[in-house]
Image: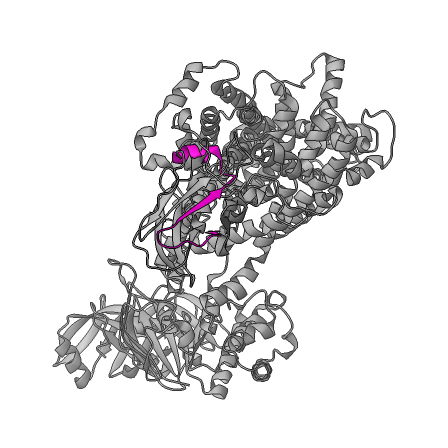
Amino acid sequence: MSSVTLRDLTKQYGGNAALSLDSVNLEVAHGEFVCLVGPSGCGKTTALRMIAGLESVTSGEIEIGDRVVNDLSPRDRDIALVFQSYALYPHMTVFDNMSFGLKLRKVPKDDIIAAVTDAARILDLEQYLDRKPAQLSGGQRQRVALGRAIVRNPAAFLMDEPLSNLDAKLRVQTRAEIARLHHRLGATMIYVTHDQVEAMTMADRIAVINLGKLEQVGSPRELYDSPANQFVAGFIGSPSMNFVPMHVESVDGGIRVVSAGGDIDVTLDDAESAMIRSAGVSDVVLGIRPEHIDNQPRTGRGLQMRASVEVIEFLGNDEHVHLSSGSHELVAIVDARAPLTIGDSLTLSASSEAIHLFHPETGVALK
Amino acid sequence: MTSVTAESPRVAAPRASRQRGWWRRNWVSIAFIAPAVIWLLAIVVYPTIATIRFSLYNESATKFVGLHNFGSVFSTDSILTAFKNNVVWVLIFPFFVTFIGLMVAVLTERIRWATAFKAIIVMPIVFSTTASALVWRTIFDLDPHVGVVNAIEQTVSDWFSTPGAYPLNSAIGQTAASLASFNATGGSGGTLVSKSIVQPGGTVMMGLTRVSSLTLQTLGAKTPVAPQKIAGGIAGLVWNDFSPSQTSNTTTIVSDEHGLPNLRLSLVNSTGSSVASTVTNASGDFSFSHVAPGSYHVEILASNFQTSFVGTFWLGSQSITPTSGLNQTAQSILSVPLIDLAMIISYIWIWAGFAMVLIGAGLAALNREVLEAAEIDGATEWQTLRRVTIPMLAPVLTVVFVTMVINVLKVFDIILNMAPGSSQGPATTLALSIYNDGFTGGIHSGVASAIAVILFLLVVPVMYWNLKKLKGGSP
Amino acid sequence: MTIDAPVKQSRVGRLAKRLHLSKTVVNVILGLVAIFWLVPTISLLVISLRPESLFGVSGWWKVFTDPSQLTFGNYSTIFSQGFATGGVLDSLLTSLEITIPATLLVTMISSLAAYSLVFGSWRGRDWIFFGIVGLMVVPLQVALIPVVQLYREMGNLFGLNPYGTIPGVIIFHVAFGLPFGIFLMRNFLTGIPRDLLEAGRIEGAGEWKIFYRIVLPLALPAIASLAIFQFIWVWNDLLVALVFLGGNVHSPLTIFLYDQTRSLAANYWIVSTGAVVSIFVPLIVFFSFQRYFVRGVLAGAVK
């Protein structure tokens, strides 16, 4: 197991194309599970393939362990890659699929058998060793792809959206299996996905990438509680954070942030007011997660909102309520036991810790 | 539309009007397919059955002869030759054309000018096999002034050994020694050496025979002059010791004999090393001056007798396999005429593009990620090709291979047009036999039909298997 | 102008670049292969452009050192012969007379039959289709002798014996082109949604109109592939023409060339020019419709 470090990693296809990756810096510690997340086309798969050596580096460095591997071919980097489509050798049995890499490296036959049976046991594949991929289900094929990687005992595991071809139930199951595998092997894992739920549940740290740029790296909690910008805030968490454009007003020496129409207003304390003042903006974007909106009034610092109910989605324990506040629409998650009907006028609030304020142009978090 | 009666809607209309209804609804559809069906029945289905029948009847189709024709097929040398040639074709052609198609398809992925390249390779398919056969016939022509192959062979052979002025006829196994007539004997390494020993101040005369008058004419040979002694030197004469007027005189010069010009000579001392060299003049005379005292022989160098270029008769029926001692039938079965190779090469030129296109399509359809997985697993490019790409291509490769087998079982045009008259018989194939037997000199149906039936039996299972594979592959 | 099946070119290219056989080596190898492949065609062209007198005296490759050898003399001779019987142009015409009707008939009859097989509602369609496709395995050598006889019978019965005539050749070619043609067209037509026909029927169109105005225009790519394949196949055929036209006064180019090789004197000027002419036509067809040709080859792996 090794660490993996990306330094100012940049990728450009062709001379004038936009940068697929723009100066990404990331350090994955030895044994850490890091997720690269972002929307389709953001560059996360490109980054993974560059670590694997399947794409060339335009500028920057990739280190595996303490070696700079930019010029090494994939076979010399000691990494294993689990493909989205599994990429199993269709003409070989499961056993041969898993042992192919070892055979190429001229590992003695007995060692091969030991390694493969070991991996097969961990992944519950022992009875399938003689089958060909075509005779396996999707979930089984995925495990064979994992097994192929495990057997190699690589410095790092790279995984490219391995769960996206599985159905929902299998996905949940396999998520847990991969997490378990990580703990059992203590392996360095870099995992690419567009699904933030996977990232939040499995990763030690998450790297959010958008349009080639690294937006933020941090633990799931950090990303949830303190998103660095509006993009990260909106990407993490489901249902996603509500955003409302607000106007900054100076009042009584403090700062108040109100929505157009005044149905939503936020009162800040001195420290927070100072931050906003120093940012020198007259408008901000308010961010508040649906789960943090309470259906009760509040006084003092924090957010107050008047809104009327437009749509109610009953989910058993909770209700997702679509509200309209002035001309703004928000979603709130409330306890289902409180009776609500469409058209109700509500007074809602949120604590000041749950409030995020973002710069209207750059999207950077101001609070 | 038949109307539905109000009282009993579930009662089916009587049979006649049901049929009429069906016909009325479908007659256009039937009419659409009728021409094809009739055409096929008349020209394909019926004739196939008829041929099977013909094969069981005699040549004029009047008497039932059972399997007699088939017996003739397997006991006629010319037809056995045809079988053998088809076997040769099947063993060599499909493999190589698939192999070349594969190699080319794989390499073509790397270059920018792939489209142009593919067009070049595929192009020969649109030429008629007849035209292609003619082209390749000139390429393989024996004459180095016509055939590229022999021209190259000649250039290469001239590089290594320029022909001498007096080339031996290798076809009849001539050696330098056989040319010796007077005071000459065969030496080591194809040379001719004087029998007599000569010392400075002496003369030596050597007579050869079997030199063609054409050679003498070309070299401008003149009447030989008896050599004059040279003090401190050695003089001599090499002449063609054959006088039409005095055929028995093999020791002296006769006036209608000729000297032998342009012969490269070497003066060899008693220890066997050469001390001087010279060349005879137009009348065959030569001299060595300032010779140190000692005893010498005169050596006529082997290079003088170097055979001139004899081309390779690619279009000929000489066998590659050693079959000279065998009887006629055995030879029919075991000899492999050289022209088969020449024709196979030409046929590969025509069809490799087909293999390349099909395999190229199969290659493009491969899951790239599996190849990347192999690379990550540690495979070199050659290992990936051998252990992953080719096995994954197995279905396409098989279809190509089998299609080529079928193609070659029916090969006809190229032999008819590429083989010169003398090679037609030894190079014949089953399809050609059907034509020759059935259609030359009138129409004979018995044996030709038998061959056709055999061809049919060979081709059908292969094609059927191929079709199943294709259908299995496509949705 | 593309001959490739659709390919993720950039990804393939990127993969290929990482493999170890250097690009220059590959380019050199393939360059040599391309030259080798072009030599025969070029040799033919050059021979046809050199005077007959040089043949056998100096190799055609000498033209690179002495380009003045090139002349259009042979071609002008051909053209001055005009359409005189036994000349190259006469054979060209005969080839066209055989190939064009054969191609048209095969495409038309195959399309009609395929339409019936795909959109008809009579039972047994699938069986008939399998039967027809199965006929693809029959080698045409098997049918030659009986068809000659059949022609004779027709002559006895109707006074029209197609043996030795151009229609006789055409009939045979069409028959053996149908199984493949129907296979190709039928597979293509299954991809046309029935809804289009339903819409046409609702608007009052009869079957023929639907076929002619809706299905046929949509089927043009397949028809083009089939037509090209058939054209080249029939154009280049020798055996069928030999059997059914053997002694005829007008012979197609293939027989014309074949006759030249049989005659004792090697008239290379006429053989080479004739060959060039015979190659020229399919080459034009090929280059104009390359896309369709490749599709036809891919589908025609059975022929």
Q: Is residue C301 visible?
A: no
Taking the magenta stretch, the answer to whether it contains residue B18 is no
Q: Position of residue A213 (x, y in %)?
A: 28, 70
Q: Does residue C122 appear to the left or right of A27 in the view shown?
A: right
Foreground residue, B461 or A281? B461
Depth check: C4 or B113 in front?
B113
Q: Residue furthest top?
A: C159
Q: Position of residue B94 (x, y in %)?
A: 59, 49
State which region is magenta.
B194-220
| Residue at image coords 43%, 19% | C78
Residue at the spot 32% in from the left edge and 71% down from the top edge: A209
Query: Residue A230's spot in the image, x, y percent?
Result: 28, 72
Q: Nearer the viewer, residue A363 or A249?
A: A363
How many numbered markers are drawn?
Answer: 0
Residue B213 part of the magenta segment: yes
Q: Quadrant of residue B68?
A: top right
Q: On the rendered image, what quadrant is the N terminus of chain B found in? A: top right
At which x and y percent is residue C154?
73, 17
Q: Determine the image quadrant of residue B200.
A: bottom left
Residue located 52% across and 44% down the image: B179
Q: Is residue B190 visible?
A: yes
Question: Left or right of C27: which side holds A361?
Answer: left
Question: Is residue B404 placed above or below A75 in the rendered structure?
Answer: above
In the foreground, B126 or A216: B126
Q: Quadrant of residue C254?
A: top right
The colour style of the image is one colour
